[in-house]
């Protein structure tokens, strides 16, 4: 990141077109959401399931989860991503405002954790075989989110 770049809050939708499909509509209707364009709920479920399959065996990430069952964490991430990309608002209905940094503040998130998270998420994103433009949009957001969550630069 250059000194001119800033990390925006990934819990807040950006003002760009990242949440809407780039496909043109001939009917004059507004384009569909990114959520719809990539396949909706089943796509986000596959993404999160694959991510947590990697987390389960990751020596850096797994210790961050006290519960033996990663299911609740997976559900929270899936609902958050679905809502962010224009799907159901279940996350906010059940958990309120995302407050991502506040919710993750108790956990040490440094460069090693960020990089491990990105490795597992990259693998999960690639497993989806999305259209290249959709994959790039999703990955740009995930990289921003990972940077935003770092709360220490000290080594573990």
Image (tube, rainbow, N blue to C red):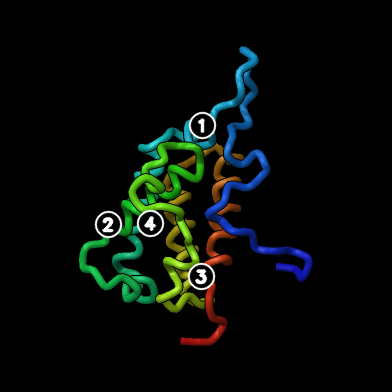
Above or below: residue 40 compared with residue 12: above
The residue at the point 59 percent across, 58 percent down is 9
Residue at the (54%, 80%) spot, across then down? 152
Q: Residue at x 32, y 76 (%)?
A: 63
Q: Which mark lies nearer to you, 2 or 3? A: 2
Decide: few, some or many residues near mark 3? Use Cα within 10 Å; few <14, some 14-19, many ≥20: some
Quadrant in the rendering for residue 156: bottom left
Q: Residue at x 25, y 56 (%)?
A: 71
Mark 2 or mark 4: name the one nearer the start of the chain: 4
Viewer-closest of 89 and 38: 89
Spot occupied by residue 97 in the image (x, y as percentages of width and height): 45, 53
User: Mark 1 near mark 4, Cβ–Cβ under 8 Å?
Assistant: no
Q: Are marks 1 and 3 in contact (CB under 8 Å)?
A: no
Q: Residues within 10 Å of mark 2 (few under 14, many from 20)?
A: few
Which of pointers 2 and 1 indicates the residue nearer the eye?
A: 2
CA–CA distance in space, label 1 to label 3: 28 Å
Look at the numbered discs 2 and 3 and tell me whether their residues touch, using CB distance below 8 Å. Answer: no
The residue wearing badge 2 is 72
Determine the secondary structure under disc 4.
Answer: helix
The quadrant in which residue 56 appears is bottom left
What residue does disc 3 label?
A: 115
Q: Earlier in the sequence, mark 1 or mark 4?
A: 1
Q: Is the residue marked by circle 1 packed among few (<14), some (14-19), or many (20+) residues within 10 Å?
A: some
**Which dot marks residue 37?**
1
Left or right of 27? Residue 61 is: left
Identify the residue under disc 4.
Answer: 51
Q: Earlier in the sequence, mark 3 or mark 4?
A: 4
Q: Are marks 3 and 4 in contact (CB under 8 Å)?
A: no
């Amino acid at each position: 990141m250059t000194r001119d770049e800033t990390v925006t809050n990934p819990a807040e939708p950006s003002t760009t077109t990242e949440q809407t499909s780039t496909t043109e509509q001939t009917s004059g209707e507004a384009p569909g959401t990114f959520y719809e364009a990539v396949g909706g709920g089943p796509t986000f479920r596959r993404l999160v399931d694959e991510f947590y399959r990697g987390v389960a065996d990751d020596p850096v990430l797994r210790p961050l989860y006290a519960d033996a069952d990663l299911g609740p964490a997976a559900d929270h991430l899936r609902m958050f991503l679905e809502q962010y990309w224009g799907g159901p608002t279940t996350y906010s209905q059940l958990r309120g405002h995302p407050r991502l940094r506040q919710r993750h503040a108790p956990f040490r998130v440094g460069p090693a954790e960020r990089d491990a998270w990105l490795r597992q998420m990259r693998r999960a994103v690639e497993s989806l075989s999305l259209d290249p433009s959709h994959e790039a949009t999703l990955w740009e957001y995930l990289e921003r989110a990972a940077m935003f969550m770092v709360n220490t630069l000290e080594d573990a």
